[in-house]
Image (tube, rainbow, N blue to C red):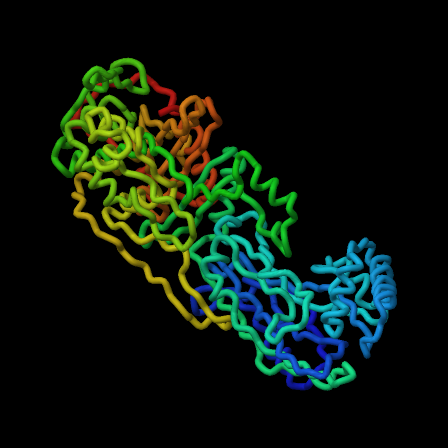
Amino acid sequence: MTFMRIVVELWMALWLFALSAATHAQTLAPAPAVSPSASPEEETIIPTFETQKLARTYILDVPAPRGQIADRNGAPLAQNRLSYNLVINFPTPLDFSDKQALSYTREKIDAAGKIIGRRFRISDETILRHYRNRGIMPFEIAQNLSQEEYEKIKDALPAGMMVRPIYVRIYPNGKIAGQIIGYTGKTGRNPDGIIDNHETLWPETEGREGLEQTFNEMLTGKHGEYKLTFDKDDRKTSERLITSPEPGYNVVTTLDLHLQELAEKALASKAKRGAMVIIDPNNGDILALASWPTYDPNMFVPSISADQLKALQDDKDIPLLPRAYRSSYPPGSTFKIAVGIAALESHAVYRDDRYQCVPAYQIGNVTFHNWKKGDRGALNFVQALTESCDTWFYQVGVKTGSAPIIDWALKLGFGAKCGIPLRGEAEGRIPNDEYMKATHGRKILNGDIANMSIGQGDIQVTPLQMAQAMGVIANRGTLYQTRLVQQVQTFDNQIVTAYQVRAKRTMDLSSETLDQLDTGMINVVNGAGGTAHQASLDNVEVAGKTGTAQWGPKNKERTAAWFAGFLPADQPRYAFAAVYEGDVGSKVHGGSAAAPMIADVFKEVYKGQMVAHHEQRRVREQPQIRRAEPVEEDDESD
């Protein structure tokens, strides 16, 4: 989209400045620049005044065009568009009586209202305060004219009125990535007191949430300076731009707009509340960071009404909450992956060891149940992970002990913030003896270990942490720093700051343990007794783990249904985590609630593609290990 060039009838220097700066379309992507269609042409706005001044000289600040925010391919997520404010200029000298000033202003307001079909509500007090204190400056009666209003009035302006061009922030994709981008707000109201040197010609915007807030200083740019001189009779004698405003820097994220849109679409169609995170396991880049419900940041442009804001704040589903990184949940059976690693790597169990998958298991005077009824027989790790046998993990977890489980959970990135540049990230919780003593007055007991072994009890993780942990399994042992921003650039694509890929740690995970995990997670999706058959895709092999957990205050408990994993299973490009928040008292399960959301996303990603080695899309078998043949199970619960 190309906006009309603003014709400025100022000094030639100003006009040349407009020409030179009008073309900074700011196409964004990691250098070198990407497709020129990534963002529209933006134009530098030069203020003009048909006003006078009180025998003084003023230096006023000219707000700079705000930098853009883009996805990894240069697609715009936040940018500027040209907008128009409607203003009245008072004649000089400023010798109107109050009655005359009101009459003059009301005449202009009424005429403009008839032309554009709008009724203006401006008090006499507001008009007179402006006229008395700053009558040489334009008096603003309307902001952000619609295109229809602008077309109606641009050639029919009443004498003494003008349309003043300004920049307005817009979010071209509406709700998509809205919680990540955030929004802006005005730094203050239009001034109505005595004119001060270095006040801004119009209120500038500042980031209030999301990346707009975190990178506000870089996005804001540097003010220009505009000089106005008036003689003793209030007549303007000169006006010129002393210093050109410097456009703000552009922020290039790691997000993939297409994946982000698919993730939000899947959440919107299948979850009343939930979150989905997709990362590149080979470098930690966050490709999608989606939460539902969400909001459209355009609601805040140019400002949000009190009623709209209250509606957002009072919404019981909390659309202002970015669940993907600010909410933490018990992970349920997805945490069995961490328990399995701890057990195998500490040699508490070996790959061929079998434990009974019984309906219930006694620890002290407490009975811990399996989610499935009936005796499932003796299972090894792969089989227990495939069927998600709770009683198997109770036994193995207690045998392993809390220390190795906690150690491996922390190594996988649980219990610590991922470190993304967004405020309010939750760190989750991996309970240790210190926490248990402070909270429950005792150290960790075997019953606590049993709860932890199935991802229940006091353990809490965020969807972002879960996706990060899946990335470690997918890349076979490296925990990368999750990366949401790749670069900060100047408007002409020169790199200011580059955020490098960084490995936090590389774990000494044995190939045998990783192979066991791969096999079990593939069988979860494709094997008999697996709990995520609804995530199976025709043209790509998915590895994953379901989980279902209760969380929330007593008598108001909700179910958190999870599906986490990676794909393609043989050469992972994506690691993911999806969580579905059930209603109070509802029964939802990872296999039937969360897994289909992931399937919806990657059906689109891999649409029309053929599997290079289709024969690899099969259940991974271990013929040397005998196991009890399971009764056909519904894979929609866990």
Res 96 quadrant in image: bottom right
In the image, 340 versus 617, the foreground residue is 340
The percent position of residue 34, horizontal first and vertical second, equals 48, 65
Res 42 quadrant in image: bottom right
Residue 319 left/right relative to 629: right
In the image, 200 versus 217, the foreground residue is 200
Q: Residue at coordinates 81% horizontally, 61% vertically from top-left?
A: 152
Q: Residue at coordinates 14% horizontally, 31% vertically from top-left?
A: 349
The percent position of residue 214, horizontal first and vertical second, equals 45, 58
Question: Looking at the rendering, in which quadrant would you find the N terminus?
Answer: bottom right
The percent position of residue 295, horizontal first and vertical second, equals 56, 45
Res 448 quadrant in image: top left
Q: Residue at coordinates 84% horizontally, 66% vertically from top-left?
A: 98
Name the residue at the left extreme.
Answer: 347
Name the residue at the top extreme.
Answer: 374
Height in image: 112 above or below 370?
A: below
Q: Can residue 380 be seen in this view?
A: no
Height in image: 208 above or below 582?
A: below
The percent position of residue 599, horizontal first and vertical second, equals 44, 37
Question: Looking at the rendering, in which quadrant would you find the C terminus?
Answer: top left
Residue 148 left/right relative to 474: right
Q: Is residue 107 visible?
A: yes
Residue 205 left/right relative to 602: right
In the image, 307 versus 549, the foreground residue is 307
Residue 437 left/right relative to 541: left
The number of numbered badges drawn on the structure is 0
